[in-house]
Image (tube, helix red, strand yellow):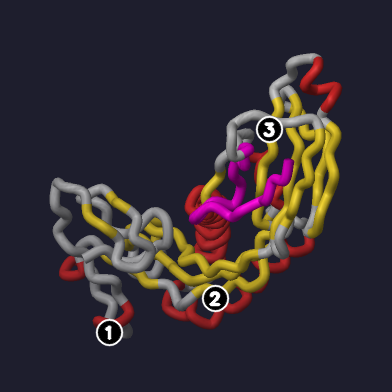
Amino acid sequence: MVLEIKPRGDCLVWENPPANGDFERHVHLSVPMGCQAFLVVDGSVTNTFNEGGHDLDLKLALKERKNILILGAICDRVFNLPIGAGGIGFYDRKSKTQMEAGVHGECTCRVIDGLRIYRSFGKTTVTAEEVQERIRKILQQEIAAVLSGYLEENDYRSFGSCISDMSADIAKKYRENHIFFDQGIELVNFGLAVPVFSKASREDTEVESCTDEEWLRLHAAEETKKKCSRCGSNVDGKAKYCPICGTELK
């Protein structure tokens, strides 16, 4: 029998069953460009196959009535992600005001190994949205931690000059340590925009050197859910910033 690996919608990993539902002893597996395939027997990956044609002998597995799956996976796809972190509290010593900061940006990632995606999620169907959401959350935590550290060491009024260093530090850490490698992902590009700041009660604080553009205006939050205009995430109605990408919520 011939079994062709066919990409399925937005999936990065998917099950590729035979047309009639049953495997035969001899299988000719056809893997297209940009894809991989895995033979999974009783939950364990026993063989991996790259682009091209491959002949499989499943006699023993069929004889022992083992559970056989053939999975397809994307091994070369690039996607851009909105990223960021919001609602990061800090105390401004100069104005003696408790404030919040948010920052957003974008990163470019490349899928490099479908098998690692399969193993990291532990399931036979993994969508691009699931992988992107995992990356966003990991970077959100990293950005929040690094931003908090920079705010401790720098006056927020001159923080714009630090943002390129902050972006470079995060990108260097993730590239050199291959932090997404076990996820089957490579970080290609990473950049953050100038952060925005809020002040809970501007009237109560005298900051003569600041203009309206330097503050992130806070809007009264509704009780219902609202959608982030940048990344599309559903956010609590009371949120001032998107917790996924750090964008101001209006």
The reply to whether the C-beta atoms of the residues labelled 3 and 1 are less than 8 Å apart is no
Location of residue 246 with respect to 208 vertically, above or below: above
Name which residue type carries label 1. Answer: Thr
- Looking at the image, tell me whether mark 3 or mark 1 is earlier in sequence order: 3
Q: Which mark is residue 163?
A: 2
Displayed quadrant of residue 171 = bottom right
In the rendered structure, does residue 13 fall within the stretch colored magenta?
yes
Left or right placement of residue 143 versus residue 113 in this view: left
Q: Which residues are magenta?
A: 1-18
Name which residue type carries label 2. Answer: Ile
- Looking at the image, tell me whether mark 3 or mark 2 is earlier in sequence order: 3
- Could you say where residue 125 lies in the image, as x and y percent from the top left? 56, 41
Element class at badge 2: helix
Viewer-proximal residue among 46 and 201: 46
- Looking at the image, tell me whether mark 2 or mark 1 is earlier in sequence order: 2
Q: Which mark is residue 140?
A: none
- Could you say where residue 107 lies in the image, as x and y percent from the top left? 56, 69
What residue does disc 3 label?
A: 69
Query: Residue at point 74% right, 31% down?
Result: 24
Element class at badge 3: strand
Quarter in which the C terminus is drawn: bottom left
Name which residue type carries label 3. Answer: Leu
**Cα gap from disc 2 to disc 1, whole angstroms:** 20 Å
